[in-house]
Image: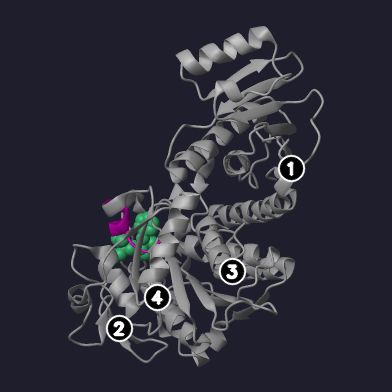
Amino acid sequence: MIPSIILTNKEQELGHLVVIVTKFSKLPAGIFNAAEKTYLKGQVETLKQDVVSFNRLSYWVYVYFIKDEKDRSKRLEESRKAGDKVAGFLNAQKAARVALFDPEGKSDEVLAFAEGMVLGSYQFLKYKKDREKENTLETIEIYTNMPEEAGEEETRITRLNILLDSVARCRDLINEPNSFLTATVFSKEVEKMAVESGAKSEVLNKQKLTALKMGGLLGVNLGSHEPPTFTVMEWHPAGAKNKKPIVLVGKGVVYDTGGMNLKPGDSMLNMKDDMSGAAAVAATLYAIAKARLPIYVVGLMPATDNRPGEKALVSGDIITMHNGMTVEVLNTDAEGRLILADALSYATQYDPSLVIDLATLTGASVRAIGKFGAVAMQAKAAKELETLKSSGYEVYERLVEFPMWDEYGEQVKSDLADLKNLGPPEAGMITAGKFLEQFTAYPYIHLDIAGPAFIEKRDAYRGQGGTGFGVRLLFDYIQKIAGTGV
Ligand code: BES
Ligand code: MN
Ligand code: ZN
């Protein structure tokens, strides 16, 4: 369980305390004795420590000095990282509760700090018998003596708890190995999330997918023992601000062996993460529905594993996609675009105002920008992508835009079929995006999250393993669209 954040109006008596201020002179009176003040002053002014701590026998006091940084994005990120660090100390001491005191009314930074604490306390322990290292933090109490906007603050905290729970669920789905998480189990987990959040869901089974002629998803599934699924989640509240929905599409390859073009050596190692896009879509819809945001949103999650079974696709095979286009499959490891293409084509029936897909699609995107952000591309959605990029800075899930130039599109045209699923060795993330664009006729944003979706080594509050990249980004964006960002 991750900790939850609550707003209180009273000081906590004799418990772990974090005081969050911008500078030494802003420290509230009555909390620190003279010796503590001298110590704090030395630590912050001479040693330039941003987190200072001392022990009062039965509890610890931490002071976080918010970074004097003009760039809001960086300032909030520093606060999240500091929150993660302090949560680490508290969990090591087996603390269950902590109070955050915000004497200056710096609620953005304080909530970012709390966010870092919560996400940094996330663990995936389902398969561990030894719970010795289980985190203990349960409650983060925030109090301030600036209560004017208390109602608004309450709403923000409620939403933040929903969002962070959604990120944790997204991470759980990613961290689950394929031995548990088949396409069918994935769809069942998503259905549970729909029921819990009040969203609608429907799972299209293999028979339905065959009737729908989803040749991409069925083709990738040919080498598997497990049937494919296509999960639809829908949140369509009365009083929605938009008539035409925003459709989110997520790549749900529950395991990518590469198929007949089997992945060599270590490159298969973390391929349970190849459903991170679908997990982010499910978790985002879950968050939006739970927070009852007044926006009409649909999530589409095609899912299968990619394996080299007896009937698997081989190089040169030609398949017919949901929209009737034919694709020459030159590399069975370029499977993501095949299942996404069917979903993008399927999205057309919703007459969407915008479709955003999230996919761990290419190693090329990781080579281009590493793991510090995601590759983004757009067609007919330049303004929408600008807004999404600004959400990216707000939540520190940053986006780098690449072009949709026609020349790259020429590189995925086939001599034998309408398209081929493999471009030249250069700019693989762009040719993949251009391939997908062929299946869209609406405003479209493509996010290649192959880099940031999963990290082997712990990186502050992003944790280790599935990061949940995309959930905080999309939730912030949808809140903006809904005009309910508070
Ligand atoms: N799932 C992989 C992409 C990937 C790579 C995700 C690294 C996460 C980390 C995708 O299906 C894939 O195999 N892509 C190939 C495409 C190539 C064959 C055109 C790649 O990037 O090597
Ligand atoms: Mn692949
Ligand atoms: Zn893949």
Query: How far from the left and from the top, in percent, is residue 228?
Result: 52, 76
Q: Is residue 335 visible?
A: no
* Sooner in the amino-acid sequence: mark 4 or mark 2: 2
Q: Residue at x 27, y 52 (%)?
A: 367
* Sooner in the amino-acid sequence: mark 1 or mark 4: 1
- Estimate how packed mark 1 is, as few (under 14), some (14 to 19) or many (20 or more) residues with alpha carbons within 10 Å: few
What's the residue type where badge 4 is placed? Tyr
Magenta extent? 360-367
Q: Check mark 2 vs ligand 1: CB closer than 8 Å? yes or no.
A: no
Q: Which residue is mark 1?
A: 147
Is residue 376 shown left or right of residue 99?
Answer: left
What's the residue type where badge 1 is placed? Pro
Q: Nearer the viewer, mark 1 or mark 3?
A: 1
Q: Which residue is mark 4?
A: 444
Q: CA distance from mark 1 to mark 2?
A: 60 Å
Q: Nearer the viewer, mark 3 or mark 4?
A: 3
Q: Residue at x 68, y 15 (%)?
A: 55
Q: Is residue 292 magenta?
A: no
Q: Which residue is mark 2?
A: 327
Q: Which residue is mark 3?
A: 482
* Sooner in the amino-acid sequence: mark 1 or mark 2: 1
What's the residue type where badge 2 is placed? Val
Quadrant in the picture for the C terminus: bottom right
- Estimate how packed mark 2 is, as few (under 14), some (14 to 19) or many (20 or more) residues with alpha carbons within 10 Å: many
Q: CA distance from mark 2 to mark 3?
A: 38 Å
The foreground one among 141 and 70 is 70
